[in-house]
């Protein structure tokens, strides 16, 4: 299993809306590195859901339910989408500030590649954030 982090501005698509929808297509990604990460995702992989711009918190865990396919928001074949379902809400949101201060987490792609909307997470990072968020994976 691999671990990921996906970002969304809460005013555009929030964790609460995701919970209501029960499933979503992660589309509209127009960055090649982020697209490559979408391509690498496998059914069952876990992804942290991060509120960007407002909040700056990891708020939940999503699960890949459908692997990459042609992004339905464009005719350009270069772009992909992946379907996610909510897996679990964090009991305590984990802030970007907490991530930056933690020696184990300060090298995460979330910190190093802050503009990347879909990034990788190591297993150790995943477990640490779950612990900080008050949940078991």
Image (cartoon, rainbow, N blue to C red):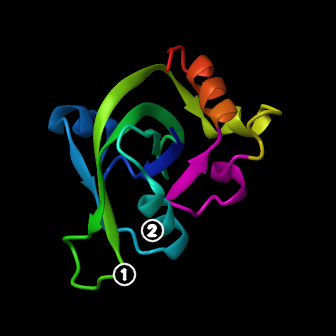
Whether label 1 touches label 2, CB < 8 Å: yes
Q: Which residue is drawn at the image coordinates 16% and 39% (left, top)? A: 21
Q: Which of 109 and 51 lies nearest the eye of the viewer?
A: 109
Give the image location of residue 68, x and y in percent. Answer: 32, 60
Q: Image quarter for residue 60?
A: top left
Give the image location of residue 129, x and y in percent. Answer: 61, 27
Residue sticking out furthest to the bottom = 76
Check the image and report above or below for 116 versus 127: below
Residue 104 in the figure: left or right of residue 123? right
Give the SS element for disc 1: loop
Q: Which residues are magenta?
A: 108-122
Give the SS element for disc 2: helix
Q: Image quarter for residue 71?
A: bottom left
Task: Check if residue 109 falls in the magenta segment.
Answer: yes
Q: Which of 83 and 7 lies nearest the eye of the viewer?
A: 83
Q: Which residue is drawn at the image coordinates 36% and 81% (left, top)? A: 78
* Circle 1 crowding by C-alpha within 10 Å: few under 14, some 14–19, many from 20: few
Q: Return the disc, 1 or 2, that comes first in the chain's sequence.
A: 2
Label at residue 52: none
Give the image location of residue 3, x and y in percent. Answer: 53, 41
Residue 90 in the figure: left or right of residue 33? left
Q: Which residue is mark 2?
A: 35
Q: Which residue is drawn at the image coordinates 78% and 31% (left, top)? A: 102
Residue 47 in the figure: left or right of residue 112? left
Q: Which residue is mark 1?
A: 78
Q: Which residue is drawn at the image coordinates 60% and 32% (left, top)? A: 126
């Amino acid at each position: 299993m691999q671990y990921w982090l996906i970002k969304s501005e809460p005013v555009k698509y929030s964790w609460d809306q995701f919970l209501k929808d029960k499933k979503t297509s992660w589309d509209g990604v127009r960055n090649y590195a982020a697209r490559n990460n979408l391509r690498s995702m496998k059914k069952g992989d876990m992804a942290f859901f991060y509120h960007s711009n407002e909040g700056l918190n990891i708020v939940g865990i999503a699960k890949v339910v459908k692997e990459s396919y042609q992004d339905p928001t464009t005719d350009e074949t270069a772009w992909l989408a992946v379907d996610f379902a909510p897996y679990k809400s964090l009991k305590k949101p984990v802030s970007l500030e907490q991530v930056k201060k933690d020696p184990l987490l300060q090298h995460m792609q979330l910190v190093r590649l802050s503009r990347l909307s879909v990034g990788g997470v190591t297993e150790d990072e995943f477990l640490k954030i779950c612990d900080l968020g008050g949940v078991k994976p």
